[in-house]
Image (cartoon, rainbow, N blue to C red):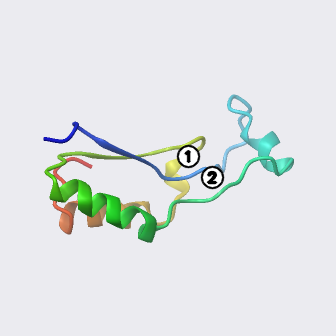
Amino acid sequence: MPTRQLVAGMTSLCNAKCTIYGCPKKFANKTFQTGGMSFEVLKQPMDEWAAIGGPSLELTWVVCAPLVDPGLLGKGDYAVSHSGLKDV
């Protein structure tokens, strides 16, 4: 039986101007690569995780905000409807 949860960091994007994590400064200085995880990169690990009986997937953040990922809901939908994961 696999561990309880597969954790996937979805983005290093942020639309806030907070300074607590230093994101705006890193973005302005171009010292931090920004972007989101593509569906193609996430699909295979989700399918493999589900195939070995993995029960749960957490779509979380790397540094900034996962909710700015325009494909987040589609990834969650795929995890439930096609991969068969029970808890996303």
Q: Are marks 2 and 1 in contact (CB under 8 Å)?
A: yes
Q: Give the x, y percent position of residue 79.
A: 26, 61
| Furthest-top residue in this view | 20
Q: Nearer the viewer, residue 5 or 11?
A: 5
Disc marking residue 13: 2
Identified at 62% across, 59% down, the residue is: 35
Q: Residues within 10 Å of mark 2 (few under 14, many from 20)?
A: many
Report the residue marked by disc 1: 65
Residue 52 located left or right of residue 88: left
Residue 2 x/y as whole percent:
19, 41
Q: Nearer the viewer, residue 11 or 20?
A: 11
Q: Name the mark on residue 43.
A: none
In the image, residue 56 lies at what x, y percent?
23, 45
**Is 79 rendered above or below residue 18?**
below
Q: Residue at x 72, y 41 (%)?
A: 23
Mark before the other along the chain sequence, 2 or 1: 2
* Figure label count: 2
Mark 1 element type: loop
Q: Position of residue 12 (x, y in %)?
A: 61, 50
Residue 26: quarter of image:
top right
Give the residue drawn at x 22%, y 37%: 3
Q: Is 73 above or below relative to 59?
A: below
Q: Quadrant of the N terminus?
A: top left
Tag 2 secondary structure: loop
What amino acid does circle 1 point to? Ala
Please give the name of the residue rendered at 25% of the width and 60% of the height, measured from the top-left corner: 48
